[in-house]
Amino acid sequence: MRSRFEIVNRLMNFVSANELVYSPLDSAPLYRRTRVYDIDYSGSSEGLRHFVRGVLTDEIVEEIMEDGRPTAAEGTAALDVFLKPGVLDLEKEYILRYANGARPANLEIHDLAIIQRYYIQHPCEEADIRRIVGDLVNPVIQDWSICLPPCLPAGRAGGRSDA
């Protein structure tokens, strides 16, 4: 089975997207970053929720969105940046090693992907999104996808790092 969990820091507000690029953007959009865990597992879905709450989040400052779909407000794009298959991901390897060593009850985690999600608020021109992707994504080791408003699965467009 597969499940996605988005981890949102309650204390992180939207800040200038100029932090993501080498030179200022024309439209001056704002962004907020979250983490998404896409987990392939077998066993209890309640056991997986318990593992995510206990190991992957700090429930004092973070909240969990369980379906992993973008939680953007209207008019906000969601840019997902993730490692290409086969690239060494030390955080992923550590989590898998911990999960397999701890052996949570009724749960076995087979694989996971860690996605950095950037919510980019409107107004943001298409050229600015291309610049953000070009400056943020390392095409050697990363791929990306973007969900343009409205952020529904049908609006999700695949991306390549050669933007």
Image (cartoon, helix red, strand yellow):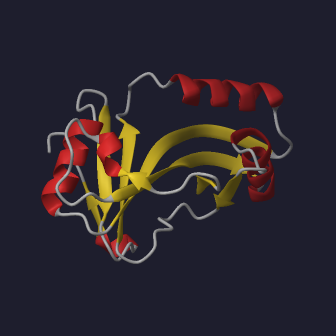
Q: Furthest-right residue in view?
A: 105
The residue located at (65%, 56%) in the rendering is 10
Judged left or right of residue 162, residue 16 is: right
Task: State which quarter of the image contains the N terminus.
Answer: bottom right
Q: Is residue 74 visible?
A: yes
From the viewer's perspective, tell me whether residue 138 is left or right of residue 1.
left
Q: Residue 88: image x %, image y %?
A: 44, 21
Q: Position of residue 47 (x, y in %)?
A: 80, 51
Which residue is drawn at the image coordinates 18% and 63% (left, top)? 125
Q: Is residue 130 above or below residue 110?
A: below
Is 109 situated left or right of 113 in this image? right
- Residue name at image x 27 percent, y 31 percent: 138
Whether residue 163 sits left or right of residue 48 in the image: it is: left
Quarter holding residue 100: top right
Q: Position of residue 69 (x, y in %)?
A: 50, 65
Above or below: residue 93 compared with residue 37: above
State the residue in front, 142 or 13.
13
Q: Residue at x 57, y 51 (%)?
A: 12
Which quadrant holds the C terminus? top left
Mark count: 0
Instruction: Residue 4 in the image: state x and y as whole percent.
Output: 57, 55
Does residue 1 appear anywhere in the picture?
no
Q: Which residue occupies the foreground of this view, 91 or 108?
A: 91
